[in-house]
Image (tube, coloured by chain):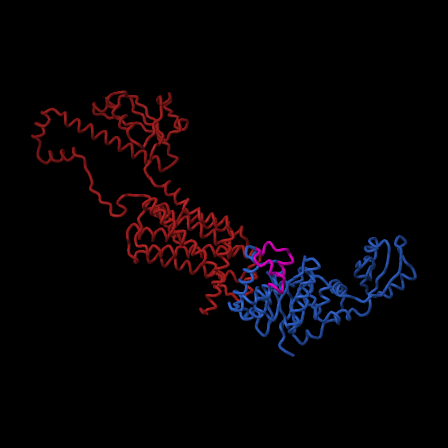
Chain colours: A red, B blue
Amino acid sequence: MMGRNFWGAIATITYKEFLHVWRDRRVLLAILIVPPFFTLVFGHAFEETALRDVPALLYDADKTGDSQRLVDLLRSNGTFLWKDWSGPGKNGQTGLLKAGAKAAIIIPAGWGKGLHDGDPKPIQVVLDGTDTDTAPAIQGVLQGVLGEFQMKSRDNMIDTLPDEVFEMGEKLPESVRHEFGSAMTPWTMESKILYNPGLRFIDFLMPGIIGLILQLLTVTLIASTIAREREVGTLSQLLVTPLRQSEIVIGKVVPYLVISLFLIAGTILLSHFHFAVKFRQPLVLALICFLFLLCSLGLGLLISAFSKTQTQAIQFSVFVLLPVLLLSGAFTSLEHFPDTVRMFSQFFPLTHFCNAFRLVNMYNAGISFIAVDLVCLAAGAALTCGAAAVLLRSADD
Amino acid sequence: MSEPAIWLNGLVKRFHSATAVDGISMIVRSGEIFGFLGANGAGKTTTIRMLCGLTRPTAGTGLIHGLDIWRDRFRARSTYGYVPQHFSLYSDLTVYENLRFFGGAYRVRKGKLRHRIDRLLSEFDLSPQKDILAGSLSGGFKQLLSIACALIHRPSLVFLDEPTAGLDPVHRQYIWDLLYELSEEGTTIFVTTHYMDEAERCTDVGFIQGGRLLAKGSPMDLKNRLRGKLLEVHVEPVMEAIPVLRAVPDVYGVELRSGRLRLQARDPEMLLKGWEKHWPYPHLCWMGHEWVDPDMEDVFMAYSLGTYEADSVPEELETAS
């Protein structure tokens, strides 16, 4: 069965499929432009994770030296882009929406006095919580700024303490003195970042971006191949030849596999040179890419064999790709999802690709860590291609 | 007698509840030009698709060159070619690339393939167009290319599903000349058609209606079975006469042929006697009559109208079943 005939038949179909791609110049152009273009756009879009230039309002109702120091500190922080504001309205309305701001910060009157009277008043913050990411991030930044302010004030205070205080302190029992001293020293942590020491988000993201683009491209490209033949009528002609279904399926996968391998290599090189993403264990990464593309092409081919027309094939691909894009963990880690959804995501090739690729590239993990992902991808490829071959036969009934 | 090209016994195809082919039994001998006739939806294409192993028979058996049409379909396929009803080659491949692809698909050896393509190109007058995309060929040349692709592996049997539908008379003639040449070289031809003048050229024809094979025999046989001559009347104005005569109880069918009306009736001689005595339609002018030999069109009409009687079942069917 695996004789000269088998390979000859596959070569015949592969050559024909290459001609189809070659003759469709517009799609060819799109195939060549889309991956690098999107890699650049997505890469730059998510390069920085910290918030910057968040439009915000600031009003100092206190107008003391203390409040002015806090205002200076806030203004020097790059997170915010301060807008001119004359303070809240009569009913305390801030007019966030009208001002186009995400946060309004009000230093209440008497704030500076409260600090010295031992009765610090809270800073008032009004936040736009619609985007659930931004509000907590702003709160965090403000908390940090306040902490910094407080630290400076304390240092100031210690420097200016009268000598009597120290004399009084000497009289305290040693344990209390130590505890007090400890309380007055800022506590720190010594952290060591084991993986991704530069905390470069782009290094985490790049496998997701590459996988996402290739997932999209492979499925949509191959999804129309069998469906087109069925729609135009060439499938009957093809099935009347002595070609086996397996030969047709393999012959159709090979050209797209070759094309997408070139594309994935191209995007990887681009992200290496442009975003300085480092890649480890190139042979293992190549194996992951190969199995991922094979599995994705199988998925596309299955959709194609299942569809009656090209339109249907494209529609089905959209239905299938949508959850893949959102739930595969390409951009977020799967820990965000509940268990049932996580189980669901195990069915997507992109999930295993991202997981394995990151394990190898960021953790420099050995093959045993990614064995499960590789097996899943290989099994997926075999299952989808096999099912596509079976569906080819029952074209009529 | 040598092994028949096609041998069918009680072939049935049902789609859900509809029965497309309802128990066809017949033999097509090697070297025959077999014309498969029937109205649209009669079951012709479904039968061909079953024969080619594209769809599984619901019941019954069929053999092509002794190989089962479903179980042995992969082996059987190298012995026949199939020209589907609609143009279904690759429009974005050139004439030459299409031929080469099908040559590869039929596993023609590389050494032979080149020579064979060149011969087909010149035989089919396609040489000047060999580098043109198949999609930009005219209808006639598309059909020629389809046939050429089906012949690339030199099959001993070719199925052609309405090969001349929608073609101009010149290309129709050309294709039939080709079929004759093939037949002379010993290739069995299985062709479906709507054109009765084409049916006339077959060595054997079968009529299918509602999925059943109503008759099979040579065109001469079938015409003879119409028993005698047909009545053709000359009445003016002819278009007004058609509905009037169709309403006569014993008239099954009225057909316009070169200005005359050809009648299929239960007893045409009685009808004529009556009319010669008394012509009951004063607004229609009786200009005379003629007795004519039936042609295949009449046979087709007779079968379509169901006016054939049970005695016309060909004896061959019994031997097949």
Query: Is B68 on the left or on the right of A335, as rendered?
Result: right
The mark total stands at 0
Q: Which x, y percent locates residue A269? A: 35, 49
Q: Quadrant of the N terminus of chain B?
A: bottom right
Q: Is residue A89 left or right of residue B17?
A: left
Q: Is residue B88 magenta?
A: no
**Residue A125, position in %: x, y?**
32, 29
Viewer-nearest residue: A321 or B256: B256
Residue at the spot x=49%, y=49% of the render? A27
User: Which residues are the magenta region?
Assistant: B121-144
Quadrant in which the C terminus of chain B is drawn = bottom right
Most common secondary structure along the magenta stretch:
helix
Res. A317 visible in picture: yes
Q: Nearer the viewer, residue A264 or A305?
A: A264
Quarter of image, res A200: top left
Give the answer, above or below, for where A48 lies relative to A343: above
Is A250 positioned to the left or the right of A108 in the image? right
Residue B106 coordinates in the image, percent (x, y): 54, 67
Q: Residue furthest right?
A: B277
Percent of width and height locating residue A318 = 48, 48
